[in-house]
Amino acid sequence: MRRSICPLALLLVILPTSALAQVKTVAQYIADLKAITDRADIKAANDYIDRNHESILHEWIAITEINAPSGHEQQRAKYIESLLRKYHLDDVHYDSARNLIAVRKGTGGGPMIVFDAHMDTVFQPGLQIKATIRDGKVYAPGIGDDTRNVEALLTTIRALNEAKIKTKGDLVFVFTVEEETTFRGVKTYVNENKSKINHYIALDGGYEGFTYAGIGINWYRHHFIGPGGHTRSRTPPYSATLPLARAIERIYQLQVPALPSSNLNIGMLGGSEVVNAKASDAWFTVDLRSTSNEVIADLEKQIKIILDEEAARVAMQVKTDVISTSPAASIPGHRESYLVRMSEAVHRVMGFDPPITNSGSNNSSAALLAGISSISTGAGPCDGAHSLAENCEIEPLYEGIKKVLLLEVALTGLH
């Protein structure tokens, strides 16, 4: 049904009237961008990046080595703040969620564009991080997710200043907290500023392409509740781990569609506190993801049936805690919007044949759910995210920073 709707009507949903005239073909935006890249000030900004590879790498590593578990970003934030204070920006401050915000004001007459990189990581407090370099890569937990993009934003600010580039619109750099857990940082920022934001770009992963919609993510903790007991007590009743095991096996046999893009994972388990006890409360977590809210709802129903059947089979109860829910985030017609077309043009001018998908899983979803045109992309290719073996290729980062800079000036407009 949606494909039969007039594309112009869809654009009216997401674009103000003043923006409609700006929506051109990707080819037209490419022509505009080539003229921009020929400007002396843009060349000077790119030259700054080329001349400072070593210092960029050292700073990237320095930030990464400051451990910043989600909810414990303060030390890393203070370090980033100390850098921002040197850049003569118009405003540097923290908001009510402790996001660190830096504003580079434009000359006027342009949009407000937000670039976001999150400061937090998935790693435990107390982890000592030491980066190593070998075979053209840098290895460290959190080097890619999301420190490469924090460094990209810091470098673009310096490059813009070095080249004395003036933009028409305001550039707002938001270094967010708790992206890896609750999205509290981005939700707070968007809720407090959504009336002012024209476009929101989340830098989190990605390199050659970008996403323009967000995958739905629901997290649950399912409990089987029984009488418990000692290993030597009469059986039945069983340990609550028995229905848990049976349920997990059946849940993993469910058919999870590849199209629309969907995923299911059971990541955490819990039971008794000692070896010689029958668990009275055995639990496991479920992570459901899909670009379709209908698919998530259907899988929820199927899982509930399994839980209820396995609990009844051993005369136990089921309790479900909803840890968090975030519906699939999309704006009708967004694929043909100004932001998406311009972003595609930027990637093509930079030499990429960009994959453009609707399955983002990051801060851009919060903006999209608030009705703000948003994409997510990144500044460099990395591997092993969320693992101790996380690593990134070094040389591509510098081209990725240039891509981010071009996106910044293309969206805000040059004075």
Image (cartoon, grey):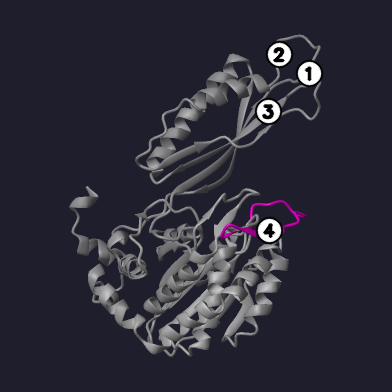
Whether tag 2 and tag 1 are in contact, CB under 8 A, the answer is yes
Q: Mark 3 points at which residue?
A: 282
* Residue located beneath label 4 in the image: 71
Alpha carbon of mark 1 to alpha carbon of mark 4: how far? 37 Å
Distance of label 2 from label 3 (alpha carbons): 14 Å
Locate residue 370, reporting x and y percent.
44, 62
Packing grade of label 1 (10 A; few <14, some 14-19, many >=20) is: some
Magenta residue span: 121-137
Judging by the rendered image, the residue that carries numbered circle 1 is: 229
Query: Is the residue under label 3 in contact with that under label 4 (CB below 8 Å)?
Result: no
- Residue type beneath disc 2: Pro
**What separation in Å lies between label 3 and label 1 (alpha carbons)?**
13 Å
**Residue drawn at (28%, 79%), measured in percent from left and top?**
32
State whether the magenta stretch is mostly helix, strand or loop: loop
Say which quarter of the image contains residue 336.
bottom left
Quadrant the C terminus occupies: bottom left
